[in-house]
Image: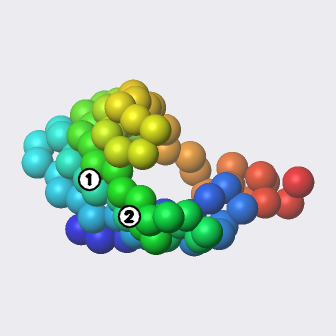
Amino acid sequence: MTGEVQSLDGTLVGSVEGLVNGEVFRWQLTRQVRGAAAPTASWKGEATVNSDELYGRADGLSCPCTFVLRRVNTEAIREKQTR
């Protein structure tokens, strides 16, 4: 699957490609970096799906690092945008 990554304000950050196999999500993110020596930066990682959360590890610029992603409902997103 492919998609786009947006910042909290909705600005396009980059593109992501991934594959889900059972409860494991493997992905790679590519981002354009303006004004940097290298025009793009990339990260790759793996996450385990657990209900509405993804726990994982990423490698790339300023990493290795661990992360947790949580599903947010549409109403919460709209509320944040109106603040």
Q: CA distance from mark 2 to mark 1?
A: 10 Å
Whether 51 is drawn above or below 72: the answer is: above
Q: Secondary structure at mark 1?
A: strand
Whether 18 is drawn above or below 53: the answer is: below
**For the residue marked with disc 2, what is the amino acid?**
Thr
Q: According to the image, label 2 marks what residue?
A: 30
Answer with left or right where residue 17 lies relative to residue 31: left
Give coordinates of residue 6: x percent, y percent: 56, 64
Give coordinates of residue 76: x percent, y percent: 69, 49
**For the residue marked with disc 1, what is the amino acid?**
Trp
Answer with left or right where residue 83 lies relative to residue 75: right
Identify the residue at the far left of this view: 21
Label count reads 2
Answer with left or right where residue 32 lies relative to residue 21: right
At horizontal 46% and vertical 71% (from top left) the residue drawn is 39
Contact (CB < 8 A) between labels 2 and 1?
Answer: no
Mark 2 Cα within 10 Å, few/some/many (few <14, many 20+)?
A: some
Give coordinates of residue 14: x percent, y percent: 47, 68
Identify the residue at the far right of this view: 83
At horizontal 88% and vertical 54% (from top left) the residue drawn is 83
Report the colour scheme. Answer: rainbow
Which numbered dot is residue 54?
none
- Asked if residue 14 can be seen in this view, the reply is no
Looking at the rendered image, the disc whose residue lies closer to the viewer, 2 or 1, is 2
Q: According to the image, label 1 marks what residue?
A: 27
Mark 1 Cα within 10 Å, few/some/many (few <14, many 20+)?
A: some
Give coordinates of residue 11: x percent, y percent: 65, 69
At horizontal 40% and vertical 30% (from top left) the residue drawn is 65
Quarter where residue 22 is shown: top left
Quarter where residue 51 is shown: top left
